[in-house]
Image: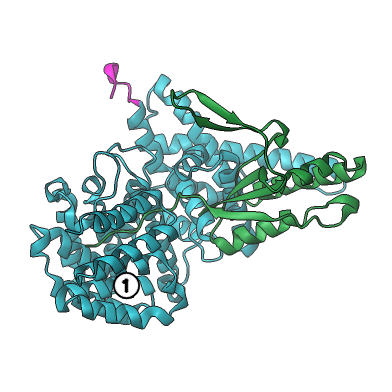
């Protein structure tokens, strides 16, 4: 808050972003046109962002936004029907009943959930689903999303409008998926949130947090989904995974922005509050029954986070969790991590054997991560020259600059101090 | 994932291009404009630039005192960047498909030019989590 009781810009932003999905839910339901409602709500948000800092928060911010967005919808429908009348005088368009002032509805928690399901619809490409979710549920502007993904605003606007078009064309009604569909659709939602997190978590270098920080946005959205689906263990699993991973953010890069691998991180920099929250979530959900991949990954992250030092890491426990995860998912990246865990428990030779078995898997055989893991295990096995060669091969294949710097530094380290 | 699509050409190609008939040039320019618009409409466009002809191109190195030493006479075989596009797509196949489309752009007589397009990943992907 600024002086004089006026809400500060950041406080207003928070209110707006929290209200975005609620207002959009109300307007989309009332007018039965998600795409147009989404535009109208964005306009209402922009109006609020200019008026509220000047005039102060309205008494009921949600009602204010709903009213402004509904008015835009009405204006648009009027001009649409006027246009159609001009085009064809014979056609009498019955204007939809929009005159009555929107009754103030209680926050429709269900609407937010409907929105999340809609924005993460499996018919959308991941890039479209991510963009639409951030705007319609997260309340970010197109410019902010474009900035976060380092693409021009027009490109992001196009992605969003194409996403809305796909939704329109697919004829998905604005309602919750059926009970049978629900579990499958929730997997898509969690996957989109995971991708948003990953984009932010891995591309952040310094310690500076931005408002459009994608990791924190993903955590905020995961909290909403978890709150709305309290019975779903994987929704809790994802939130726990994000918290437990994000907890290490500050330790993950050094002062120069170079990557610091987990085993060398300064653990005092880890965020204890987030670790405790993640662990608490897990302890609550794990005993409840069905264990899914997010819970398992969260459990692995928790074992790392709870080790007082790298040397005290409970590798047998991590190996057991990766074995469960491997049975559950056909992801070759899981198999690579499993090989590392096996090496830490049974020795590098065992890990290298497991890697050899993966050579036939085309998805991973020529992946930089395969070479990087092999390099690490060869180094553990004392084969420094081969390890350096693999680090270099991995450096040549990665698409990440900090990662290439890291891999090349490893190769250089092994080549120089051969004493 | 971001990829840069680079159109490279030899000095002789630039010289020939400068002598294309008007209709051929116009067709090519229209194609390039439509192509950029298509990339924008698809939501994959990041950037594009066309470069000046290489006639005046120079290679600069720092001399002993740090002052620029330029070199400007190039062998006929040297390739120059003519222009580039940066696209943000899901995978390499998509980047290659876009490159093929621009390679098929109309040359003299409206026949597909089949210009070679170099496709390289821009170092912008997220690094992996290093769990060790």
Find out whether residue A332 is within the magenta segment: no
Q: Is residue A261 above or below residue B27?
A: below
Q: Quadrant of the N terminus of chain A?
A: top left
Q: Label 1 marks which chain's residue?
A: A
Residue at x 44% of width, y 42% of height? A148
Q: In the orientation shown, which residue stands out farthest toward the top? A: A4
> In the figure, is residue A13 to the left or right of A271?
right
Residue A37, given in percent of the width and then of the height, sits at 56, 46
Question: According to the colouring, which chain is green?
Answer: B
In-front residue for pair B103/A2: B103
Q: Which residues are magenta?
A: A1-8
| Quarter holding residue A173 | bottom right
Residue A299, given in percent of the width and then of the height, sits at 20, 67
Q: Which residue is mark 1?
A: A336
Question: According to the colouring, which chain is cyan?
Answer: A
Residue at x 31% of width, y 70% of height? A374
Q: Is residue A99 visible?
A: no
| Quarter holding residue A12 | top left
């Amino acid at each position: 808050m600024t002086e004089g009781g006026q809400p500060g810009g950041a406080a207003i932003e928070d209110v707006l972003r929290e209200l975005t999905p609620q207002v959009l839910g109300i307007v989309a339901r009332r007018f039965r046109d998600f795409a147009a409602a989404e535009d109208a709500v964005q306009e209402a948000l922009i109006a609020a962002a200019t008026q509220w800092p000047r005039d102060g928060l309205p008494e009921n911010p949600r009602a204010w936004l709903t009213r402004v967005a509904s008015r835009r919808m009405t204006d648009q429908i009027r001009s649409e029907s006027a246009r159609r009348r001009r085009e064809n005088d014979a056609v009498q368009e019955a204007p939809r009943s929009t005159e009555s002032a929107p009754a103030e509805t209680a926050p429709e928690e269900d609407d937010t959930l409907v929105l999340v399901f809609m924005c993460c619809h499996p018919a959308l490409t991941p890039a479209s689903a991510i963009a639409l979710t951030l705007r319609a549920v997260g309340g970010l502007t197109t410019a902010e999303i474009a900035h976060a993904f380092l693409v021009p605003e027009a490109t992001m606007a196009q992605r969003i409008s194409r996403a809305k078009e796909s939704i329109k064309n697919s004829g998905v009604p604005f309602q919750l998926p059926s009970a049978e569909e629900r579990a499958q659709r929730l997997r898509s939602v969690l996957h989109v949130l995971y991708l948003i997190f990953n984009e932010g978590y891995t591309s952040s270098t310094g310690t500076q947090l931005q408002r459009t920080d994608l990791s924190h946005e993903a955590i905020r959205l995961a909290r909403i989904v978890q709150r709305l689906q309290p019975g779903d263990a994987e929704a809790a699993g994802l939130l726990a995974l994000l918290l437990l991973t994000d907890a290490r953010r500050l330790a993950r890069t050094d002062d120069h922005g170079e990557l610091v691998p987990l085993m060398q991180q300064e653990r005092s920099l880890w965020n204890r509050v987030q670790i405790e929250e993640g662990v608490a979530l897990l302890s609550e959900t794990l005993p409840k029954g069905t264990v899914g991949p997010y819970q398992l990954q969260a459990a692995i992250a928790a074992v790392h986070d709870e080790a007082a030092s790298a040397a005290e890491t409970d590798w047998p426990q991590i190996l057991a969790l990766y074995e469960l995860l491997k049975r559950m998912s056909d992801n070759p990246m899981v198999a690579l991590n499993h090989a590392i865990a096996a090496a830490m428990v049974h020795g590098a030779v065992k890990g290298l054997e497991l890697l050899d078995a993966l050579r036939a898997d085309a998805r991973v055989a020529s992946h930089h991560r395969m070479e990087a893991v092999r390099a690490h295990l060869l180094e553990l096995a004392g084969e420094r020259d081969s390890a350096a060669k693999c680090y270099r091969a991995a450096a040549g294949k990665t698409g990440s600059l900090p990662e290439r710097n890291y891999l090349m530094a490893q190769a250089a380290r092994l080549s120089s101090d051969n004493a | 994932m971001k990829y840069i699509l680079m159109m490279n050409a030899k000095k002789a190609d630039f010289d020939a291009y400068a002598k294309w008939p008007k209709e051929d040039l116009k067709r090519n320019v229209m194609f390039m404009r439509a192509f950029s618009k298509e990339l924008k409409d698809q939501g994959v466009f990041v950037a594009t630039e066309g470069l000046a002809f290489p006639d005046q191109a120079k290679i600069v190195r720092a001399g002993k005192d740090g002052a620029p030493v330029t070199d400007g006479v190039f062998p006929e075989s040297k390739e120059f960047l003519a222009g580039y596009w940066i696209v943000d797509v899901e995978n390499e196949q998509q980047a290659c498909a876009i490159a093929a489309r621009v390679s098929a752009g109309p040359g003299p007589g409206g026949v597909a030019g089949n210009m070679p397009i170099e496709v390289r990943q821009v170092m912008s992907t997220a690094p992996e989590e290093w769990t060790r």
